[in-house]
Image (cartoon, grey):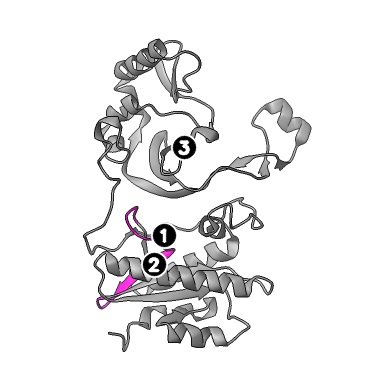
Amino acid sequence: MIWWVRTDDVVFHYDLNQRAIVAWSRATGVVTDEPTVWLSHRAETRRRLQVPRAMPGWWLDLDGGFPLDKPLTLAQLRSQTQAIRGVRDHLKAAHEGSLYFPFFFWRGTELRPMQPYLNKLPAEFVELFPLLADIAPTSARRETPLPSTHGTTELGAPYRDARVSPLSPGRDPFTVDSTLVERGLKGHADTQNELARVLQEAGIEPRSRTPGEPNFDLAWEIEGVVFVAEVKSITDRNEEGQLRLGLGQVLRNRHRLRALGHANVVAVLVPERVPRDPSWRDLCHEVGAVLLSRDELEKAPTLAVGMT
């Protein structure tokens, strides 16, 4: 199914533990061939293989996820069972072959989510639930933009913890979104979450981006000054390239936040350790950015001092 997903398509995420649709994301980039570390859920296969292993796979990067204002629970979905059945029956009558419908009717009556990881979510289904329809414009509302903060000066959304993902750090940055790959690395996630913790302990609210904002790692505001941070994991081998990439990203994010109405924005480049080349600090100063390595994060709450 991944080959049918197009750039900017909206993907809704169903959480088995919460028994609800809890978040959404937007497809970005193109499908790439990349090994994935995985172990089958099939009991016989699990007993035979015993441990996860690299297998051929396909990847498509997602921008998000963005939590729904409130989860759309399975109970709420079941309250529309007949309408959902009507959507499925209409599609079956109109199209030959498999529908890849996201729900089935156990014993003919009880609505349950399908087991495949990725299914089609028909526009007619989305229209049944305003919480979904407001996010993913369907054919009847194709001119309606996705949620955006454009034209407002509200900064971001409550902070979402960075998590480590199984993405391979060696994935080609020219065939995938390097920002999304970078965020899956432990050094990046730990540094970003530590910065958020330092801010919270100082009484400052860290913010995560909303769909209409640039793709920053986190941001915060002190005395009318907005700080936008780009975190970078670095090694001796990739330090130069990572810092070049990070500085370009954070300057671009600063520019875009200003365009959204934030008059005073400071770009903050946050590598997970002090760069070996001290000239990076001088360069950041020249372009009006702040270099704040992981061992200096305690300074974050005081950056606004003396800034206008």
Q: Secondary structure at mark 3?
A: loop
- Prevailing secondary structure of the magenta residues: loop
Residue on which the image places disc 3 = 17
Which sits in the foreground, 175 or 160? 175
Segment tinted magenta in the rendering: 210-224
Type of amino acid under label 3: Asn
* Earlier sequence position, callout 1 versus callout 3: 3
Q: Position of residue 226 (x, y in %)?
A: 31, 73
As drawn, 110 above or below 158: above
Residue on which the image places disc 1 = 215
* Earlier sequence position, callout 3 versus callout 2: 3
Q: CA distance from mark 3 to mark 2?
A: 35 Å
Which sits in the foreground, 131 or 289? 289
Which sits in the foreground, 27 or 101? 27
What residue is drawn where x is 50% and y is 14%? 97
Residue on which the image places disc 2 = 253
Q: Secondary structure at mark 2?
A: helix
Type of amino acid under label 2: Asn
